[in-house]
Image (cartoon, rainbow, N blue to C red):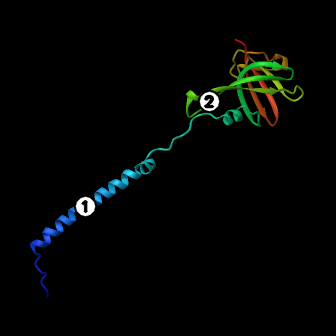
Amino acid sequence: MDIPPEKKPMFYLVSIPVFIAGLVLGTLIISYVFFKTKDRICLLNQPAEVNTELTANQIQRAASLEQNRTIFGKVLATDAGSFTLQFFVANPLDTKNSTTTSVKVSFDQNKDEVIKLSSVPATPAASSVKETKGSFSDIKVGEQVLLKILDGKKWVYLTPSS
């Protein structure tokens, strides 16, 4: 059985300064590399930025009269066979960034319908809203309307006058 040799003081005098110098140089190199790459490393820890701006494409899609849509708005103008409807486009991510837009709605009197809503006394068995058929000429500028589009057919609900 061999007994390990006794380490001499010269070993300690050389190895301790070499260890400390290596520790200092290693720390300096690691901190230099971190300083150079911290922008990329810190981006991984930050939450992703979400763009909450409404784009022109989103507003255009909101104003399109595609199938199966319901739009509530104010009539800005009426023409022969069409009317312009202004409505609110809400931005659920940033309510301060919401806007209004308008769309021109064509109206085919043979296919589309106008329904006038009026208030009646409420009874337990019946609704307090009465629906009556109307015509395109009943749509007035400044009036609030509900436009419902289903399978290419439009229903314009006229709200009761105050």
Q: Is residue 119 in view?
A: no
Image quarter in which the N terminus is found: bottom left
The x and y percentages for residue 57 are 68, 36
Question: Do tag 2 and tag 1 residues touch (Cβ < 8 Å)?
Answer: no
The amino acid type, in three-letter code, at marker 1 is Leu
Residue drawn 56% across the image and 29% down it: 95
Q: Is residue 132 above or below residue 40?
A: above
Q: Quickly name the residue at label 2.
A: 90
Q: Quickly name the residue at label 1.
A: 23
The x and y percentages for residue 117 are 75, 19
Residue drawn 84% across the image and 17% down it: 137
The x and y percentages for residue 38 are 40, 50
* Number of the front mark, 2 or 1: 1
Lateral position of residue 106 relative to residue 94, left or right: right
Q: What number of labels is visible?
A: 2
121 or 157: which is nearer to us?
157
Image quadrant assignment for residue 156: top right
Lateral position of residue 46 relative to residue 72, left or right: left
Q: Is residue 33 in view?
A: yes
The x and y percentages for residue 25 are 27, 60
Image quadrant assignment for residue 135: top right
- Residue at the bottom extreme? 1
Q: Is residue 59 above or below residue 126?
A: below
The amino acid type, in three-letter code, at marker 2 is Ala
